[in-house]
Image (cartoon, helix red, strand yellow):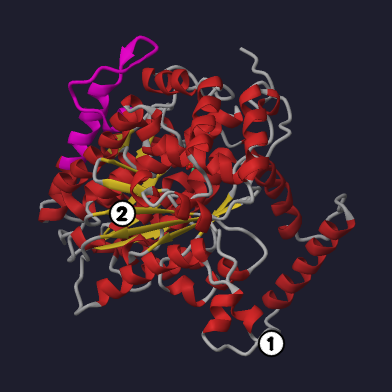
Amino acid sequence: MSHPQLTTRPQWQALKQHFAQIGSQHLRELFATNPQRGEQLTAEAAGLYLDYSKQRVNADTLRLLRELAIACGLPQRIQAMFRGDKINTTENRAVLHVALRAPASEKILVDGRDVVPGVHAVLDRMAAFAEQVRSGAWVGHTGKRIRNVISIGIGGSDLGPVMAYEALRHYSQRDITFRFVSNVDGTDFVEATRDLDAAETLFIVCSKTFTTLETLTNAHAARAWCLKALGEDKAIAKHFVAVSTNAEEVAKFGIDTAHMFGFWDWVGGRYSMASAIGLSTLLAIGAESFRAMLDGFHAMDVHFRSTPFERNLPVLMGLLAIWNNNFLDTATVAVLPYEQYLKRFPAYLQQLTMESNGKHVTLDGAVVDYATGPIYWGEPGTNGQHSFYQLIHQGTHIVPCDFIGFGQPLNSLSDQHDLLMANLIAQGEALAFGKTVDEVRAEGTDAALAPHRTFAGNRPSNTLLAEKLTPYALGTLIALYEHSVFVQGTIWNIDSFDQWGVELGKQLAKATIAELTTKNEPKLAHDSSTSTLIRRYRQLRNDGNSGSGA
Ligand code: G6Q
């Protein structure tokens, strides 16, 4: 079905007009005219509390955004996703990460077959395997128990597992070391293994396709490393397992498919951390905690599917992102977790948001005439406060922020958690309300310095709070962002589940590798910059090979 271009919709036009009226209103004014704003513009679900009162919106904005969502078919799109319709049209696939966390009693059909029993069968196998490794029953080729787990994967087969491991490290089994290798840069593998004993090391090769250059290259390096230490081919069986949808390639690589954990084409890479791709997470935290994480995901899934838009967290976050991106023209979002364990969360979100919504054509293939996915980035607080927050407070770009914090610390060290959270709360306040020149002067600041010490304020933020960073809470948080991405993609009428943009660079690299490595000077037909870079690289590389380098 072909859609009218978004910007011609009357609901979009109404928002434009509305922006012309309220766009310059200051948050100071909005709070002054409604003293209850900080209680009213909030929503709560599955233990997550969202305060969006510091967004530059009023009740009319929210109503108009909801009307836009309805005009864009969001209610139907949500149902279509949960029903297993092939909404990833450019790849002709269903988008069913929600099935990965559905209870066994649920039925979800893809091409007429219920996928839920398969999900639970894999989960049970993962749990049984993890129990063997964690208890020491699974031993390596020489009879030693497994002390190190290295997950090899990249992109969606890496960022989720790394983030989840870091996020839930508090709950992890501490006598097993977990490491992650993704980069084709040999340093990644070498540094991850240099102090490890192969006899105690288990590799999990995670690749949906099992054809990805980086992952296969690292998996071969891992096999060579194991063989060098353990001597014989049959050692591999006890030191390698695979997570994939491609049994044929797994077998070709030499991993027994009895040691393979499967998933399905309706799980997108960046939406796969609740599938077998999460095997390292399960190994680290155990089956009970992993299931608690899935329950958290599921609670947010149910909320998203069934809650009226006024109180629906992913819908609210998604629509506010549209408002900021398309009407305030903000183009970027900073994600600022005040929780050290979430240090990889911004990197994870970068893929989730930017690979999903960094698109320039609609589902019908028409070039959009509006901005799509903003740039996501961030760092844990309070570290960021001593670097890039300067720009967020006083720069010329408006950067909407998502602050994320918890009521209870996982590691209490005197009053440090209160210090941390005081900073989170103060940052949102400073961004929203700023400090006027009069306020600065009233403090006795010298007139020449006063402009430098002034904060315009009116900088929007969301604040997300939960009781404690548990596996359950992590599940709710991730599902919140996943669905918010979907809401935005639906409004922009793009395919949030494909990633054709990563292809061109891959193709060109394949051709370039020969040009970098052939013995004889290759004939180059690139542009002058690319050809010169290739020549310069060959020269630098050969200088190194001739031993003239230091
Ligand atoms: C994610 C992308 C991409 C993918 C990697 C790894 O949504 O599809 O990041 O996850 O390219 O792919 P494999 O799992 O097939 O190795």
Question: Is 263 part of what is drawn in magenta?
Answer: no
Q: Quadrant of the rendered structure where residue 317 is?
A: top left
Residue 248, percent from left and from top = 41, 30
Tell me if residue 18 comes above or below residue 395 in the rendering: above
In this view, the residue in front, 258 or 109, is 109
For disc 1, the marked residue is: 448
Residue 169, placed above or below residue 60: below
Total numbered circles: 2
Q: Residue drawn at (47%, 50%), measured in percent from left and top?
A: 33
Please indicate, yes or no, whether residue 102 appears anywhere in the rendered image: yes
Q: Which mark is residue 465?
A: 2
The amino acid marked with disc number 2 is Leu
Give the structural element (helix, strand or loop) at label 2: strand
Q: Amino acid at mark 1?
A: Ala
Residue in the foreground of this view, choosing between 239 and 536: 536
State the quadrant of the C terminus.
bottom right
Looking at the picture, how far across and down is residue 327, in whole percent? 64, 42
